[in-house]
Image: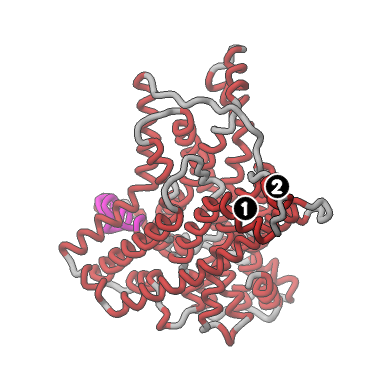
C-alpha cells in the first residue's frame, strides 16, 4: 500500500516521459525547468515560512499558557487541537470566508484595492491555522518539563527572567519545539487541500502540480519524477523527527515551575494577547464559516442543499468509508506500536526500534497525492474498488493511532506486564487485561485523530473513487468549481456539516478531558 506504489513511481519516473534527456539526466532536468523549479522552491519556502511564523507566534503564547493560571485556561488547552481536527477543506473554506474576495475581512480590503487572493497570504494563513496549535501545545508540554530548581538557582545567581529563559528554559524545550516544527514542515510541504483551494495558479505547490499532471494532462512520467523528489526532500525531515521523538521518550521526572496568577496590568495584557492570537489565527476562520453558512441558510438557498439526494449520498459514503477505515487503522496502529515495544525490549535488533518508529511516519512523508498516484499506477484494475479506497484511507489515518500508543507504551513501566506474567497470565491476557486498559486513553486519542483524518480525506477520494462514491469533501470541491453565489453558499453549508461530523466523531471517541491529557504525543 505504500512502499510498492513508491517503487512503481520510481519506475514511472525512470521511463519515457516529458522531461528531455536520458533517464538519469531526467531527474536533474527537473531543476532546469523554470516552472517546475519554482513549484518545488515555493513548496519548500511556504513550509519554511510557516515554521518560522509558528515558532515566533507560538512560543510566547505557549509560555503564557504554561506559566500563568487564569480562568478558562483548561478550556483553551482543550480547544487548542480543534483546528487540527477540522478537515482541510473546511479550513480552506474558513480562510476564504474570512479573507477571500467575499469574506468578512477580505471584501472590505478588496474594495480598497487589496486582493489577498492574489498573494501568498491566504495559503500561509491557512497553514498557520492548522499548525500553530501543534507548536503551542508542544511548547506548553515542554515548558512543564523545565526543572524549577534550576530556574530558581539561575535567578538566585542574579539572572534576569529573560536570561534565565535563554540559558535554562530554552535548551530544555528546544528538542520539543524542533519535533513539532518537523511535523509542521511535513504537513505544509506535502499538503494538498489548502494549496489547491488557496494557492491559486501562482502559489500552488508541487502536490497540486502532481495532481494537475495526472488528472488533467496525463503526464505520468513528469508527475512521477516530481513525486519522487518530494519523497526524498521530506524523508530527511521525517528521520530527524523520529530521532527527536526517540530522545523525548520517557522523559525524566522533574519538578515543574508552579503556574502563577497574573499580577499587574502587563501580565494580564500578555494573557489577553495570547488568547487573542489564538482567537485570530485558530478560531476566526471557523467562526467565519459558521457566520457565512448561517447567512446562507437564512437569506439564501443554502438549506436546500442539505436535502438534495447528492448530499445524502455523499454523507452516507463519508460515514461508511470513514468507519471501515477507522477499524482498519486501529488494528494497524496497535500492531505497529506493539512491534516498537517489542524491538525496544530486545537489544538483539540494534537500530530496528528506531527504524520501526520512523516507519510510522512514512504516510506523513509520502503525501496523499503521491500515495493515490502510486496506487493508481500499481493497481489499475483496482482503482475503482472499495477495498483499495478504504485501505488508502486507513493507511493515512493509522499513524495517529501508532504514534499515540507508542508514546503511551514508552511511559508504561515494564514491571506491570512482568508481574502479570509472573502470576501466570499468557501474553494475550496481559495485553487484554493489563496493557490495553492502561493505554486506553492514548488509544482513544489516536482513534479520534484517525477518525477526523478519514472524514476529511480529500486527495485519495479525487484519485480513487467512483462518481457514485462522492464524499462530502469532493462534493464541496465540486460546488466550489461551479460559478455563482448559490454554489458558494452551498459549499459553506456543506463545510459546516463536515466540520460538525468531524467534531462529533472526535468528541465521542476521545471522551471527556482527562487531567493528564498529553496532546503533543496524540
- Asked if residue 135 can be seen in this view, the reply is no
Mark 1 burial class by Cα count in 10 Å: few <14, some 14-19, many 20+: some
List the single residue furthest toward the left.
299
Quarter location, residue 275: top left
Q: Position of residue 255 (x, y in %)?
A: 59, 27
For the residues labelled 2 and 1, say whether their Cβ atoms are less than 8 Å apart. Answer: no
Which one is nearer the viewer's eye here, 484 or 296?
296
Asked where in the image residue 290 lies, by quadrant, the reply is bottom left
Give the residue at the far bottom of this rendering: 381
Which quarter of the rendered picture does the N terminus lie within?
A: bottom right
Residue pictured at 37% horizontal, 71% vertical: 472
Q: Is residue 190 magenta?
A: no
Mark 2 to mark 1 CA distance (whole Å): 12 Å
Which secondary structure, mark 1?
helix
Instruction: Give the structural element (helix, strand or loop) at label 2.
Output: helix
- Image quadrant assignment for residue 78: top left
Q: From the image, tell me which residue sits under label 2.
A: 419
Numbered circle sitting on residue 11: none
Residue marked by disc 1: 435
Which portion, as a residue range, is magenta?
A: 94-110
Q: Is residue 78 above or below residue 120?
A: above
Amino acid at each position: 500500500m505504500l512502499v510498492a506504489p513508491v517503487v512503481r513511481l520510481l519506475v514511472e519516473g525512470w521511463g519515457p516521459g516529458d522531461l528531455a534527456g536520458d533517464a538519469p539526466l531526467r531527474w536533474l532536468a527537473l531543476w532546469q525547468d523554470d516552472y517546475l523549479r519554482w513549484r518545488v522552491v515555493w513548496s519548500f519556502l511556504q513550509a519554511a515560512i510557516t515554521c518560522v511564523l509558528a515558532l515566533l507566534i507560538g512560543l510566547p503564547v505557549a509560555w503564557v499558557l504554561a506559566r500563568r493560571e487564569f480562568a478558562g485556561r483548561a478550556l483553551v488547552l482543550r480547544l487548542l487541537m480543534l483546528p487540527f481536527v477540522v478537515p482541510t477543506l473546511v479550513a480552506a473554506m474558513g480562510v476564504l470566508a474570512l479573507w477571500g474576495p467575499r469574506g468578512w475581512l477580505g471584501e472590505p480590503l478588496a474594495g480598497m484595492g487589496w486582493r489577498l487572493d492574489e498573494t501568498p497570504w491566504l495559503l500561509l494563513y491557512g497553514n498557520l491555522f492548522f499548525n500553530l496549535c501543534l507548536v503551542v501545545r508542544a511548547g506548553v508540554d515542554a515548558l512543564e518539563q523545565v526543572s524549577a530548581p534550576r530556574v530558581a538557582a539561575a535567578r538566585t545567581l542574579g539572572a534576569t527572567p529573560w536570561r534565565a529563559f535563554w540559558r535554562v528554559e530554552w535548551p530544555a524545550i528546544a528538542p520539543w519545539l524542533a519535533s513539532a516544527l518537523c511535523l509542521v514542515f511535513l504537513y505544509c510541504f506535502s499538503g494538498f487541500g489548502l494549496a489547491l483551494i488557496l494557492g491559486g495558479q501562482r502559489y500552488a505547490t508541487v502536490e497540486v502540480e502532481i495532481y494537475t499532471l495526472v488528472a488533467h494532462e496525463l503526464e505520468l512520467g513528469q508527475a512521477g519524477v516530481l513525486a519522487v523528489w518530494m519523497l526524498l526532500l521530506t524523508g530527511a525531515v521525517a528521520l530527524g523527527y523520529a530521532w527527536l521523538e526517540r530522545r523525548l521518550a520517557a522523559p525524566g521526572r522533574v519538578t515543574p515551575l508552579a503556574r502563577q496568577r497574573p499580577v499587574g496590568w502587563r501580565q494580564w495584557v500578555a494573557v489577553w494577547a495570547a488568547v487573542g492570537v489564538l482567537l485570530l489565527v485558530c478560531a476566526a476562520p471557523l467562526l467565519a464559516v459558521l457566520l457565512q453558512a448561517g447567512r446562507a441558510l437564512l437569506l439564501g438557498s443554502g438549506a436546500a442543499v442539505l436535502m438534495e439526494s447528492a448530499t445524502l449520498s455523499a454523507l452516507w459514503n463519508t460515514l461508511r468509508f470513514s468507519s471501515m477505515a477507522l477499524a482498519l487503522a486501529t488494528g494497524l496502529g496497535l500492531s505497529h506500536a506493539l512491534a516498537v515495544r517489542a524491538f525496544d525490549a530486545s537489544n538483539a535488533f540494534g537500530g530496528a526500534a528506531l527504524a520501526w518508529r520512523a516507519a510510522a511516519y512514512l504516510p506523513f512523508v509520502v503525501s496523499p497525492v503521491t500515495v493515490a498516484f502510486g496506487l493508481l499506477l500499481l493497481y489499475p484494475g483496482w482503482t475503482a474498488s472499495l477495498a483499495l479506497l478504504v485501505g488508502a484511507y486507513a493507511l493515512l489515518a493509522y499513524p495517529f493511532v501508532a504514534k499515540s500508543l507508542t508514546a503511551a507504551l514508552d511511559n508504561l513501566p515494564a514491571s506491570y506486564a512482568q508481574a502479570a506474567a509472573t502470576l501466570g497470565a499468557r501474553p494475550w491476557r496481559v495485553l487484554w487485561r493489563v496493557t490495553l486498559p492502561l493505554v486506553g486513553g492514548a488509544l482513544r486519542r489516536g482513534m479520534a485523530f484517525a477518525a477526523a483524518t478519514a472524514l476529511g480525506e480529500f486527495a485519495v477520494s479525487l484519485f480513487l473513487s467512483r462518481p457514485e462514491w462522492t464524499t462530502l469533501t469532493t462534493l464541496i470541491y465540486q460546488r466550489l468549481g461551479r460559478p455563482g453565489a448559490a454554489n458558494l453558499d452551498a459549499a459553506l453549508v456543506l463545510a459546516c456539516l463536515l466540520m460538525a461530523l468531524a467534531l462529533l466523531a472526535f468528541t465521542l471517541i476521545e471522551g471527556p478531558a482527562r487531567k493528564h491529557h498529553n496532546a503533543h504525543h496524540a
